[in-house]
Amino acid sequence: MEKTNVSVFLRKYTMIIALVLVVIFFSITTEGKILFPQNINNLISQNAYVFVLATGMLLCILTGGNIDLSVGSVVCFAGAVGAMMMDKNVNVVAAVLAMLVIGILIGMWQGFWIAYVKVPPFIATLAGMYAFRGLSNAVLQGMTVSIKSDAFIKVFGGGADCYVPDLFGGEGFNMTCMIAGCIAVVVLVAMQLKSRINNKSRGYETAPLGSTVVKLVVISAVILWISYKLSSHKGIPTALIWILLVLLVYGYLTTKTRIGRYLYAVGGNEKATRLSGINTKKVYFIAYVNMGFLAALAGILTIARLTSSQPTYGQGYEMDAIGACFIGGASAYGGVGSVAGVVIGATLMGVINQGMSIMGMDANYQKVVKGLVLLIAVAFDVLSKREKK
Amino acid sequence: MAKVLLEMKNITKTFPGVKALDNVNLKVEEGEIHALVGENGAGKSTLMNVLSGIYPYGTYEGDIVYNGEVCKFGKIKDSEEKGIVIIHQELALIPYMTIGENMFLGNERGKSAAIDWNETYGEADKYLKMVGLSESSRVLVKDIGTGKQQLVEIAKAMAKHAKLLILDEPTSSLNEKDSQALLDLMLKFKKEGMTSIIISHKLNEVAYVADKITVIRDGSTIETMDKHTTEISEDRIIQGMVGRELTDRFPKRHGVKIGDVNMEVKNWTVHHPLYPERKVCDNVSIKVRKGEVVGISGLMGAGRTELAMSIFGQSYGTNISGQLYLDGKEVHLKTIKQAIKNKLAYVTEDRKGNGLVLTNPIKINTTLANLDSISPRMIIDKDKEYQVAEEYRGKLKTKCPTVEQNVGNLSGGNQQKVLLAKWMFTDPDVLILDEPTRGIDVGAKYEIYCIINDLVAAGKSVVMISSELPEVLGMSDRIYVMNEGKIAGELSAEEASQEKIMSIIVTSGKGA
Amino acid sequence: MNKAMEIFRKHTMKIVLVLIVIFFSVMTKGQMFAASSFQALIAQNAYVFILATGMLMCMLTGGNIDLSVGSFVCFIGAIGGHMMVRGGMSVPLAMLLMVGAGVIYGVVEGFLIAYINIPPWIATLAGYLAFRGWGTALLNGATIAPMPDGFSKMFNGSIPDLFGGAGLNITCLLVGVIACVLFVILQLKSRNDKVKKGYEAESMSGVIVRCVLVSAVILLFAFKLAQAGGIPNNLIWVAVIVLIYNFITSKTTIGRYFYTIGGNVEATRLSGIDTKKIFFLAYLNMAVLTVISGWMTMARLSAATPTAGTNYEMDAISACVVGGVSAYGGSGTVFGMVVGATLIGVINLGMSLMGIDANWQKVVKGVVLLAAVVFEIMNNKEKTKD
C-alpha cells in the first residue's frame, strides 16, 4: 500500500511527528478535551469535506503545482442544485446523480480552458470561484433550503443521528464500530503479511521485518484507538465511510494505475513525459474533471451534514484543501505528494481547527494561524528542495 | 547478403531558412551495428528524429522502409510499436521518481487499471543488471549520477523490447570503464540479434563496435564504409567527416596588431550546480590578447559554454575556483553587472532562449545591457535609444523595416546581429561569442565574420566558441581545444587543421 | 477591410467599452448618462484603478498576481479604525503608520517571493486568509465608524468651485477644458517632434481623430461631474497615480526592466539586471498601493468593516486582463488597464442600474474575466507555444 519513495516517506515522518506534537500541545491546552470521543467524532465529520477536496486538489497539484480556487463555490453550487431538486420532491438518487454530473461538467469546462487553451489555472478557477458563487446565490435566491430527506442525511451525513447502527445493541458502547476496527486491523496485517510472503517467494526485494512490524503495530494501535473513541460516542459516522472510500480509491489510483503515474510524471518533467509518448494535455484535463467531481461529492457531504443549503457554504474550502495538501508534503512545483500525506495534512489541519475552537480562540485568529501554517509548510518544502528550481 | 531491416530513402527535411537534411539515404542490415558520424549540426540527430516519429510523417520528404513496409509514423509510440526505440542524448527522466517508475513510464506492467509494482521493480532490476547497473530500481533517479542515468535510459529502451535501437551519443557522460561496458553490451545485444544505430563522436568507439559507418556532412550522406571490406581507421573517418573544400568563406584580416594579454584565466575549475561532485571545467587556463580572435573548439558537452558563463560574473556553476585577470589585474566578478562593468561581454549560445526578448522591439533589445548609459536620472532618453539602435543597425547591416520591429520577427542571422549589437553597445574589451553563427545562412555568416574582424581591428579581443571547425579555422589566430572540461590542446592558426583538431579531441578522450 | 480589422485589433477594448456603454444606456433608458452615474462610476471604482496599477506591475513580471489585496484592505481598515476612531490619533500620523504597515507587509511578501522562491499565488493566498482573519479579529466582528471628517474628505469630497457657479461647478468644467487643450497640444507636439527627427509618425488625420474623441470624452466627464458637484478627490488620487505609473512604465529604466523580465527573465538576468530585486519591488509596491485603496474604501464606507475588500483581488486582476495585460507577463500598459477598469466599472454600474441581481453580476464578472484571458491568449498564440 505504501510507496517506498524515500524522500516522500521522510517528509511524511516529519509531518507525523508534527501531528503528534500538535495533538499533545492541544491535549494540554484543552485539558484533554480534544481527545474526548465526541470531539474525535466531530473531527471526522466536520472535516470530511477537507479529505475529499484535498484528495482532488492533490491530483491537480501533482501535475505541476496547479490548483483549483473554485472548489468552495462548486461545493456550494452543487449542493444548492441538489437541495433545490430534493425540495421539489425529485427522487433523492436522481438528485445525487445530478450533483455529481454537475461537478463533472464544471470540471470539464475548467479543464478544457486550462488544458487545451492554456489559460493559467489560477485565473480560470478564480473566474469559476466567482461565477459559481454567484450562480449558487441565484439558484437559492438568497435563501436557505433545508433538506428533509432522512435517507439522504443518513447516508451522507455525520450529523446527530448518522451512524452505522450497532448490530450488537451495546449499551453506551457501539460494538459494531469496535469490531469493525478490529477487523480493519486484522485485514491490514493479513494483507501486509501476504504481500511479504508473496514477494519473498518471487524473489523480490522486501522491507526489513523490523520496520514493517513497527509500522503495523503503530497503525493498528491508532486504528484501534480511534475505533474505541468512536465506539464510546455513537459509533461510525457515515461520513467516515465516504472518506475512507475516497481515500482508498484514490490511494489505489495514485499508486497503482497508469493515470496515477502520469499525473506524477507530468509534474515531475513535462517534456520527458511527452517524449515518453503520453498525452500530457489529457492528463491536465482529467485532473480538473476529477476535481469537479470530488467538489460535487464534498458538496453532497456538506449539505447532508448541515441538513440545508445556504449561499454562504463552501467559503474558504479551497484554502483548507490546498493547505492540507501542502502540509501533507505535496510539492508546490508538482510531481511529489501522496494520498497518505493528504490524510496527515488534513488531520493536522482538522486538529488545529478543533483545538483552537475548544480553546475558545477567536475564529478569526484561527484564520491567521491557518494562513501562517500554510506559508510555513510551503516554505519548508521549497527550502528543502532548493536545488530543484 | 543479410536482410535489410531499415532503409531511409531520399529523406529531406527543412526548417525555416535551413535545409537540415538533403536527400539522405541510409541502409541498415538486420543484426548489424551501424554508426552515424558527422560534425555538430551535420544532421544526424535530425535524421534519427525523423525515423523515430518525433518529426512526424508529413513534415519531411522521402520514405522510411522498415521490414519491407513503408512507415508513416505520426508520433513516438508508432515507431516504438514497431520496435524502433530511440535514446536521446538529453535524458528524458523524471528526477523525483524511482528508476523503476521511469523505466516503465508509458509502458506500464500489469493490467490496465492496476500497475503491478512488484513486477515493475522485478523486471526493472532485471534490465538494470543487463546494462550493468548494480543499483536497485527503487532508487530515485535524482540520486544517481548522470552517467548512470544514461544507462537507465538504455535499460528503459530494453524494456520496450526494441528490435532497432538508436543511441544518440550514449557514452557522452560515461567514464572509461562504463563506456567500455556499454560498448560490450552493444556487441552482446548484437549477438542476440539486435540491430543498432549509434551516433557518436568518439571515433575509437565507433571503430570498435560498428560494422558499417555512414558519414553525414552538411545534411547529406557522404559515404558509407563497411568494416568488412574497407580498412577503417580514425583518420579515414575524419577525412570523410570534415573533408570539404574550404572556399573563400572567411574575410581576411589585414595588419591587425596583436597586443598584450587582455584576459587571462588560470586554474579555473567549476562544479555542476545540481551535482556538486561533478567538475564541468577542470583546471582550465587560457589567455586572450588584444586584437586577437581566439577560437575554442570541442564537442558539445566539453564545457565551453560553462567556462564562458562561469567567467562572466559567475552566471553558471558552483564552487568556482581559480584566478581571472583582466588587463593584468586580478578581478573577482561575482555578478553579471560587475562583469559588464569590467568590460566583459558574453553573447549567449541560445539567442532565442536566453539572449533576446523576442516580444520586444530591436531598439529595446539593443540597449538592454547598458540602459543606464542613455538614461540620465533613470529616465530613458528614447531619442538616444532610437539613435543607438539605428547606429548599430547600420553598422551591422541588420535587415529590418525599422528598429521598432519585434526581434521575434527577424531571421536568425538578423537576430544574432541584434544580440551582437546589444553587447557591442556595452563597449567591452573582451567579447566571448558562443556559437555566433549557429543556424544562420552563409551570407549572414560572412557579415558576422566581418563584424568580428572590425572588433579586433579596434583592439578588442574576441573569444569564439564554435563547433563548426571551418569557422574556427577560418577566423582564429589561435585555437584551444576543449574536451571533457579540460583544455586538451592549443594550436596556432598556421599549425591548425581540421584533422589535427579532431584528432586532439579524439585522442584526449582515451584514457584521459 | 484589412485596415478595419487592424484598427479593431489594436483598439478592441476601447471599442468594446463604447459598445457596452451604448448597450447599457439603452437598457437603462439613459440613466447611464445621468450625472449621478458618472459620479458613482468614479466613487465606486477608484479603488480598482489603484489596485489594478499595482497588480499590473506584478503581472508584467510574468503573470504573477497578489491574492491578498482584499484581505489586506480589511486589515488596514481595522488598524486605521482603531487608531483614528477609537484611539483618536491624528489623521496624518495614522496614515503614516498605515503606510508603514503596508511597507512591512510588502517587504515580507517580496522577500518570500523573490528570494525564497515561494510561488506568488501561495504566498499571497496565505495573506488572503491571514489578513481577513486578523482584520476581523481586530474589529471583533463589528464595524468601527464613522471615520473622521478630515480623513474622509480627502477622498470623498470634491474640489470646491472657485467661481461659485449655480448648479454647475465651473472649476470642474474649466479643468476639463484645460485638460483637453493640454492633451491636444501634447499630441500635436509629439507628432511634430517625431516628424522633425525623422521618425515614423502617424497620419495627421489619425491624430486629429484621436484628439477629437479623447476631448469629447474628457468634456463629457467634466460636464457631468460639474453637474454632480465637481471634481471628486478620488479622481485626483487616481489621476496622479495613473500618471506616475504610466511615466514609470513607459519612460524609466526600472519600468523597462519589468517588461523585459516578463518577456524573458533569463535574457534579462544575463544582461546584468538584478531580476530578484525587481520581483521584490513589484510586491512591495503592490502592498503600498493596497494601503491607498484601503483608505478609499474606508472613506467611502466611512467605516472599517470585516467584509471590506471582499473580491477586490478579482476586480484588480480582471481590470488588468480585460485591459490587455498578458496573463503570462511582458505586455500591458497603464492606460490599457484604465480602459479595462473602466469597462468593468461600467458593467458593474450598468448591471446595478438595471437592477440585476448581485449574484448574476458575479457570474457575469467571472465570465468576462475568462473571456478576456482567452481572447488575449488567442491573440498571442505564438507567445504561449511551448
Image (spheres, coloured by chain):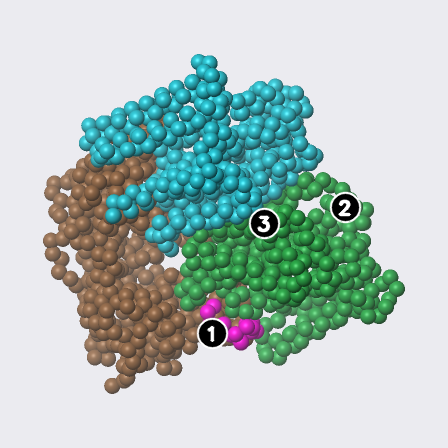
Name the foreground residue: B2 vs A93. Answer: A93
**Residue extending farthest bottom:** B1
The x and y percentages for residue A73 are 59, 51
Helix, strand or loop at disc 2?
A: helix
Q: Residue tagged by mark 3?
A: A138
Residue neighbourhood size for the residue with mark 1, other residues' Cα within 10 Å, grouped as few (<14), some (14–19), many (≥20):
many
Query: Can you tell which chain is drawn brown?
Result: B
Name the foreground residue: C247 vs B470. Answer: C247
Q: Residue at x 66, y 59 (%)?
A: A88
The x and y percentages for residue A122 are 50, 49
* 1 and 2 marks on the same chain: no
Q: Residue at x 16, y 45 (%)?
A: B450
Asked if residue C156 can be seen in this view, the reply is yes
Q: Which residue is drawn at 36% across and 22% down?
A: C177
Name the foreground residue: B248 vs B358. Answer: B358
Q: Residue tagged by mark 2?
A: A358
* Left or right placement of residue C374 versus residue B120 in this view: left
In the image, the segment drawn in magenta is B105-118
Amino acid under disc 2:
Ile
Q: Residue tagged by mark 1?
A: B127
Q: Which of marks 1 and 2 is in front?
A: 2
* Left or right placement of residue C213 versus residue A37 in this view: left
Q: Is residue A266 above or below residue C114?
A: below
The Cα atoms of the two marked residues, 1 and 3, are separated by 60 Å
